[in-house]
Image (spheres, rainbow, N blue to C red):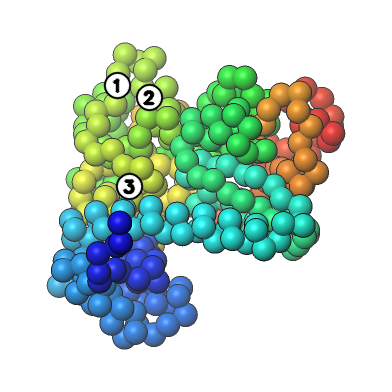
Amino acid sequence: MPLPEPVPDLVSLDLLDSVIRLGSIRRAAAAHGISQPAASMRLRSLERVLGLDLLDRSSGRARPTLAGEAVTEWGRQVLDATRDLMVGAEALRHQGRTQVRIAASMTVAEYLVPGWLQRMAASTPDVAVSLQMGNSEQVAESVAAGANDLGFVEGRTAPAGLESLVVLEDELVLVVAPSHPWARRRRPITAAELARTPIVVRERGSGTREVLEAALGPLGLAVTVGVELGSTTAIKTAIEAGAGPSVLSTLAVGTDAAEGRLVPVAVAGLSFDRDIRAVWMPDRRLPEAAREFLAIAEGTTPGAPVFSRRGPRRPGGAPEGPGRPPGR
């Protein structure tokens, strides 16, 4: 069935996504290498094509309307599919090159994988990397099914049936919008207060959701879901729009906290530590390119954090032994 016309262009959808992520048209324009007036024209054109007001510009800062949040979330699916198409086309153009198939949870894919890919391209430019994104449960399933050579998941425990190696230790932090009452609170939030407050959460199967539920469970408490969203970026946008608090990775909120868009709030008596693990099929020798990618990931050194984060468990690598991928 032919697409109805007019159809929004992908560049404008990508620009809208950048506005939501970066918090302003000016920053988004700079990220895309165009002028602010040119970015504004593209966004106005996108609104005309869709017949919707996507951004509220009345405050002097572009904030998504409810329609804008929905279009951005749907647009990300289109953009992700387009990136998959481009990765596939690249693979077809370079069928003689070595390929490695990687899957990563959303937080890892958004905040760690880009740096790993840059280092991989610099060290082994003849290797083509394909990336599949999903929540931790989906990533583990794709590796177990043989659809990917190597996966990266978040959580406190290793997925059953897979070999794993901790490449980074991470922490989650409770964050709110600057306008939220908890942003001005001097004493920590209690576990009971957090449990009875509707919060913005990831879907079931995500590593972030797993850690939050695991922290509250032993106290006989459960998460009260206010809004459930499928990506960290969407959650941050929802927090800023006043949808409620959330618990997110320090990898995801450090810059937002430093620039005042999100405010970290202490929680008494709860630990939100978790591991970021590489996973692969047991008794299967990882391809050389996958071992190279794992070595890059294992050597991750986080930048200066806004919050306490312990960093990689083995910055210099570790000797051969249990839990090490075959051939290393």
Residue at mark 3 to residue at mark 2: CA–CA distance: 17 Å
Q: Which residue has dot 2 on it?
A: 213
Q: Determine whether, in the image, residue 87 is placed left or right of residue 292.
A: left
Q: Which badge, 3 or 2, comes first in the chain's sequence?
A: 2
Residue at mark 1 to residue at mark 3: CA–CA distance: 19 Å
Look at the picture and state if 173 lies above or below 9: above
Q: Which residue has dot 1 on it?
A: 222
Q: Quadrant of residue 195?
A: top left
Label annotation for residue 287: none
Q: Do the residues labelled 1 and 3 touch (CB within 8 Å)?
A: no
Instruction: Say which of 241 and 71 sits in front.
Output: 71
Q: Which residue has dot 3 on it?
A: 235
Q: Can you say which quadrant of the picture contains the C terminus?
A: top right
**Residue 264 image offset from top left, x and y in percent:** 36, 46
Q: How many labels does the image show?
A: 3
Instruction: Say which of 58 and 82 sits in front.
Output: 82
Residue at mark 2 to residue at mark 1: CA–CA distance: 7 Å
User: Residue sitting at 25 percent across and 69 percent down?
Assistant: 5
User: Residue sitting at 73 percent across and 38 percent down?
Assistant: 314
- Whether residue 16 is visible here, answered yes or no, is yes
Disc 1 crowd, CA 10 A, few/some/many (<14, 14-19, 20+): some
Q: Which badge, 2 or 1, comes first in the chain's sequence?
A: 2
Q: Can you say which quadrant of the picture contains the N terminus?
A: bottom left
Which is in the foreground here, disc 1 or disc 3?
3
User: Residue sitting at 39 percent across and 47 percent down?
Assistant: 232
User: Residue sitting at 39 percent across and 77 percent down?
Assistant: 29
Indicate the amino acid at tag 3.
Answer: Ile
Q: Under tag 3, what secondary structure? A: helix
**Residue 28 image offset from top left, x and y in percent:** 39, 72
Q: Determine whether, in the image, residue 321 is placed left or right of residue 312.
A: right
